[in-house]
Image: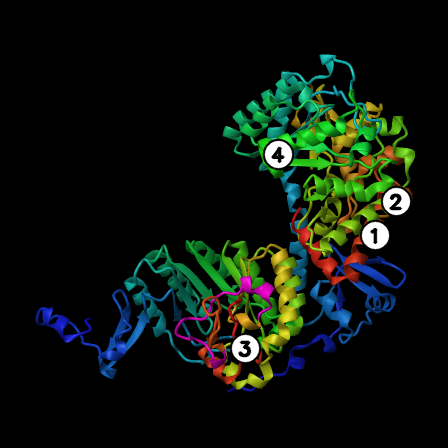
Amino acid sequence: MVKDAETLALIPGGAAAAVLSEDFHHLGDGDVVRLEPAKAGIRTLFRKAVAYNHFLLTERCNNYCLMCSQPPRAVDDGWIVDEVLEVLRLMDRSATEIGFTGGEPTLLGARFIELVQAAGSHLPNTALHILSNGRSFATGTLARDLGAVRHPDLMLGIPVYADLAHVHDHVVQADGAFDETIRGILALKAQGVRVEIRVVLQEQTVPRLIPLARFLARNLLFVDHVALMGLELTGFARANLERIWIDPVDYQAELTEAVGILDRAGMKVSIYNSQHCILEPSLRRFSRRSISDWKQEYMPECEGCAAQGECGGFFSSAKFRYSRGISPILKAS
Amino acid sequence: MAKFRERAEFDASTRSDYTMLPWRFTPLDDESYVATNMAGEYVTMSAGEVSDFAGGALRPDQPVYDELKSRHFLIDDDTQVAIDLLGLKIRTKLAPLANFTGLHIFVTTLRCEHSCPYCQVSRANDDKREFDMSEETALRSLDLAFRSPSPAIKIEFQGGESTLNMPIIRFIVAEALRRKETARRNLAFVIATNLAVLDDEILQFARQHDILISTSLDGPADLHNRNRPRPGKNSYEKAVEGIARARTALGHYNVGALMTTTAASLPQVRSIIDEYIRMDFGGIFLRPLSPYGFAIKTKSYASYDQKKWLEFFFEGLDYIIDLNLGGFEFIEHYSAMVLKKMLTPLQTSYVDLMSPAGIGIGAVVYNYDGVVYASDESRMLAEMGDTTFALGNVHDDDFADIFMGDALLEPLEQSFSASVPGCSWCAFEPWCGAEPVFHHATQGDFVGKKPLSSFCTRNIALFRGLISRMEANPEVRRIFERWANIV
């Protein structure tokens, strides 16, 4: 694939090649795309220059979270697996990290294991991060199979929204989900699979955030990372905005205490999707620039802010609602 | 888009009875109670709440309901996973038992040039080498130490003054390192010394083999010299100078110090703590006298009662808390070990706070003459003529005789706090230790009558003191959470 006619002229006659319009100039060597001549389309599947490429494995899910950014659809999308298996073979082996997401990837069962196997086999130096609700691991069989893959650098990101079952079950809109998720985490850790707990900070989860931190430090001290995450206002999150919204400036006390409990317990803890100016200064060292570059932007209030280099910025979807506390951090003169 | 269901629809608490998981309670102060579960998590409650909960009448809209549910005191139709988690937490607390004995204390000599009246061990003032450990005894003791399944073996040299027999220390270190090659264990060494006879050669040796130094520091010069008489009356000067030299040789944090509380210490806890700060230690272990050895003979032990000790301890603790509140980090080590049991899923390896007791399986002592004792206190007791906790002799008995004999198993079994009268129903049992040696020494049996036990009185007061302090002030709780995870 070449970008301009000059280069095209160098290609021997009859060789397969395509010329892309200006719109595709972001593509570079080592990227993987799929040409779809029937639709006269092209889809970008992997970009070498991006630190973290993720693959949606299925749109199906057994949770129905109030703030889901990728609302599930009950569709037969098994073809995706085949495509991802192809991409994994073509990818550049120097990739630092890739992600599997959904929907709920574990609903693919044996094919899910096949994908993890393929990722470890083709990309032994690439970290694999998988977003899952953990429920499929509760019975232990799938956890055993995943552990048996012995992927060299695997982490599962699993949400736990409260220390109380019914609060978690409400957020994910599924009865019994909490028990299955916790059992799933225990099964994964028993198999030596690394687990990250993800907590989305919203109206339903903030009131139990401190007890949740105590619960994690006491019961799940052995998990590998805890990420406390700001909302991404797409999908259901946008539809349910009034129901789930809490201004981050209004939960700084809870966040500070929760981060403190986890940190003092020696757990690795990070704050994702948050802006520096609204975080308590003592929390800034926990904040990570977690928003993918193509989704990340800043707001008009950020004009002149000296902290943009460290600040996570905003999801582009934040235009619907963001904190009243946003204001530029000015350089101390 | 499917309809989203409200929270109440997921909450079965209101529609089902709850089931209590095992729990115990005891008064905390005049107003509140403290309840604990089997894993040592606690909730403070009012008398009314205790009564409601115990009677099956607690309502889900009472705030304590969620706390009890979150900490696995109860389950209802919302969740059953609490039982898995509680079981996991109890297994975690008991898991270190499988490692068996990790700390192996070698008494290299009874000789000592100090003559402390509060000495809890025994000493020989003369120069007779008959109180020194022989190579033969050392080899046989090492045989036993390396039979322990523990992946980490710590060898601690004690005395008398351990360094008065340096040849045997050098011999044991070399031999242990040789065995490590095939035994594949983590090996650590500690020399317990009063530092008075510490020379550069010893320090160089310690540095070469990453050996830690543990010493005694009772407080400011007056107090220390009064507590610890030696020829020249300069125990303090020797200690302070020794600490500085040892730190230079081994690194600042590879030198530790312990204090012992005598009657003379009681009025000056602050200046004792200040001395530790001045010497740049990160914390202090406020340690009472134990009823053994010279401490009994010279009546040092009888010189203050439990009440005076507790006043001393809490005055010191509050002073340390104030320092921390002011931003200066400093730890009280005994509290930190208790807090680890209260606030984390982990366990401390401090022998006094273990149940099953730490004797023999948490630490073991190889005496200079080859007799194996179940603990430091056990050999002190033996020097007073009571050999109840002498487990055998390295020259005559094998591993099974010593570690699976009745002399060890009976006191372990009899004193297991989860099942003995006075402990089994105590709310503080998950945090406490069994201490059969103490109870045997003071009351003549392994269990003891708990209301008469000063071990009980002291620890119960301490547990209450720690809880009420952190319940009263969230900032103190944060300090305590930090301590719990440091030790």
State the count of labels. Answer: 4
- The amino acid type found where label 2 is placed reads Lys
State whether residue B390 appears in this view: no
- The amino acid type found where label 3 is placed reads Ile
Per the rendering, the mark at residue A326 is 3
Dot placed on the residue nearer the N-terminal end, 4 or 1: 4
Per the rendering, the mark at residue B426 is 1
Is B358 rendered above or below residue A158?
Answer: above
Q: Nearer the viewer, mark 1 or mark 3?
A: 3
CA gap, disc 2 to disc 1? Answer: 10 Å
Question: Percent x, y for residue A114?
Answer: 38, 62
CA gap, disc 2 to disc 4? Answer: 43 Å
Q: Say left or right for A4 vs A250.
A: left
- The amino acid type found where label 4 is placed reads Arg
In which image quadrant can residue B389 be found? Answer: top right
Are the residues flagged by discs 2 and 1 in contact, CB closer than 8 Å? yes
Q: Which residue is mark 2?
A: B450
Dot placed on the residue nearer the N-terminal end, 2 or 4: 4
Q: Which chain is home to disc 3? A: A
